Image: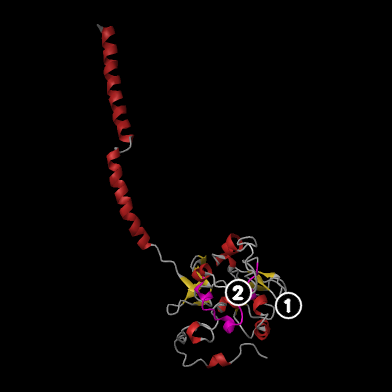
Amino acid sequence: MKRMAIPAAAAVVLGLFGAILLSVGAQDKPAPAVAAPAAAASAEAAAPAAAASAPAEVICFESRKGATEVTQTEVRPGWPNVKCSHTTTAVLWYGDPFDGTVPMAKMPGLEAIPAGLAVVKPRTPKLNLLAACGTACHNGVVPKGFPKDNKPVPIPTMEGMFPDAKNFQHGRGRIWCLDCHHSTQRNKLADHFGNPISFDEPQLLCGKCHGDKLRDWRDGIHGKRIGDFTSTGKKRWFTCTECHNPHNVQDGERNRGFMQVQPELPPQLPRGMADARHEKVHPIAH
C-alpha cells in the first residue's frame, strides 16, 4: 500500500502544477480576434485628432509668389530658417541666408569675385514641367519637324498648360517662345548664338536685351542680395526670374512693372526710445 501511495501523491502534485502552467499560458495568449475591430476603430478615430494637432506647414515667398517659395523649417532646434510675414506671407528674416544655395556660374564682368562668395538658389528642381518639356515632347525628335520656322504658331496644348502664352506680355508682341527657349533642348534657354543656357542662369538670357539692367544687377544697384555685406563677404544673389515673371513681366492689366507687395508696418521702437535717429548715423567711421 505504501508503494502505491507515493505515485498517487506525485500524480496529484503534477496535476496541480500542470493546471498552474495552463493558467499562466492562457494569460500570455493574445486577445481574441473579436477585439481587433474595436482596436482598429479607436486607432482610426485617433488619427484625425493627431493630424489636427500637428503643426500646419508654413510656406512664404522670398521675391515672387508661386516662384520663390520656401517652407519654414528649423536650422537647429528653436532656430527657424526663415520668419514669414503674417500680412503678406513674405520672408521677413533669414536664419540661414545660404540654405539650399550653390555657387553661381561664372559671369562676364564678375571674374574678380572669388569662387563660392557669390551663390544662388537653383530653381530647376521646383519647375515641375521642365523634365517633361525637355524629354517627352520637345527632345529634338518628337514631334518630328517641329518647329518648321521661327514664326509663332498657336498650339492648344501649350495654351492649356501655360495660359500666359496666349496673352503673352513680354516684348509687347515683338518676341515669341523661341527667342528665349532653345529650339530642340526645351529644358534649356538660348543665347544669341543658339547655345543652351541653364534655367538657373536666366541673367545670361535676360542680358541679351536688357544690358543696362544686367550691368546694374552686376553692380548691386538692381535686384536683391542677402548675406554678408562686407567687401569680401559671401552673398546670395537673386536672379532675374526670382523677382520677375518672364511670361507676364508687365503684370497683366497694369501693363507695367511687376507684382507689387503690400508694405509692412514699421518695426516698433524699443521701450524708452523716442525716435530712430540713430539709423542716420553709420556705425563705421569713414
Tag 1 residue: 108
Say if the magenta span includes residue 170: yes
Q: Quadrant of the N terminus?
A: top left
Query: Is residue 247 shown to the viewer in this render?
Result: yes
Magenta stretch bounds: 162-183
| Picture disc at residue 124 | none
Q: Position of residue 97 (x, y in %)?
A: 58, 73
Q: Residue at x 41, y 66 (%)?
A: 56
State which tag comes first along the sequence, 2 or 1: 1
User: Is label 2 in a helix, a strand or a loop?
Assistant: helix
Q: Which part of the image, by quadrant, shows the C terminus? A: bottom right
Amino acid bearing label 2: Cys
2 or 1: mark nearer the eye: 2
Front residue of 110 and 246: 246
Crowding near the residue tagged with mark 2, few <14, some 14–19, many ≥20 C-alpha atoms within 10 Å: some
Q: Amino acid at mark 1?
A: Pro
Q: Which mark is residue 177?
A: 2
Q: How far is mark 2 from mark 1, CA to CA?
A: 25 Å
Q: Is residue 236 above or below residue 21?
A: below
